Image (cartoon, rainbow, N blue to C red):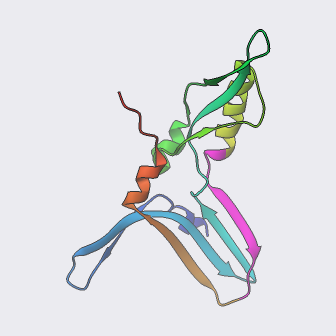
Amino acid sequence: MAGLTAWLGYRLEIVNRNGVAVWWGDIVAVEIVASGLRRGITLERLTNRISVRYSQIQPGGTATAADTTWADNATSQTKYGVYEKRITPDREMSEAEANNYRATALATLAIPHYTLMPEDGDPVAILRCAGYWQRLGRTYYAQA
């Protein structure tokens, strides 16, 4: 499994018998089925650039929406590319609480997610891929 996990984020190209590329994409998950278990690692929950949109209580008791600045995990971005997400907590919080929430979320989500579940069947390795169009969903559009 260790050798296959290194493939996460790599580009994959499928060519036809004439040597013409017919599909392009990235490896987003690797799974191995063996010895009654399915072990996997995936980028599907990866987020390495995070901002928090939160409700902040103002003097007088009213709430207003606020955003933290973006926080980045450069190591993860170098290895897998940029995966942005704006997250929204379920409760009101102060600016300091929102920044702490962002730091905790970034530390948790900037690494690939491991999976483990029972699975009977023949030993097999599975590479899950996403086409290049899926890259458009990894970052937010911001008009300058």
Left or right: residue 47 versus residue 94 is left
Asked whether residue 116 is drawn in magenta, I would say yes
Of all residues, the one furthest to the bottom in this rendering is 122
Which quadrant, please, contains the N terminus?
Answer: bottom right
Q: Give 39 or 102, whichever is nearer the viewer.
A: 102
Left or right side of 8 for 92: right
The one nearer the camera, 2 or 27, is 27
The quarter of the picture where residue 99 lies is top right
Residue at horizontal 62 percent and vertical 49 percent from the top: 111
In the picture shown, does residue 60 fall above or below 92? above
The image shows residue 11 at horizontal and vertical percentages of 39, 62
Query: What's the residue at 65%, 68% (across, down)?
Result: 40
* Residue beneath the point at 54% across and 29% down: 70
Res 3 quadrant in image: bottom right
Relative to the observer, which residue lies in front, 68 or 4? 68
Tell me where residue 72 sits by quadrant. top right
Query: Residue at left 61%, top 54%?
Result: 45
| 59 lies left or right of 131 | right
Query: Residue 126 appears at what percent x and percent y?
Result: 55, 76
Location of residue 63 with respect to 21 vertically, above or below: above
Q: Position of residue 73 (x, y in %)?
A: 56, 37
Q: Report the magenta residues as a range.
A: 109-120
Vertical comparison of 90 with 7: above or below: above
Magenta stretch contains residue 97 = no
Location of the C terminus by quadrant is top left
Q: Nearer the viewer, residue 67 or 116?
A: 67
Label tally: 0
Residue furthest to the top: 59
Residue 37: x, y in percent?
74, 78
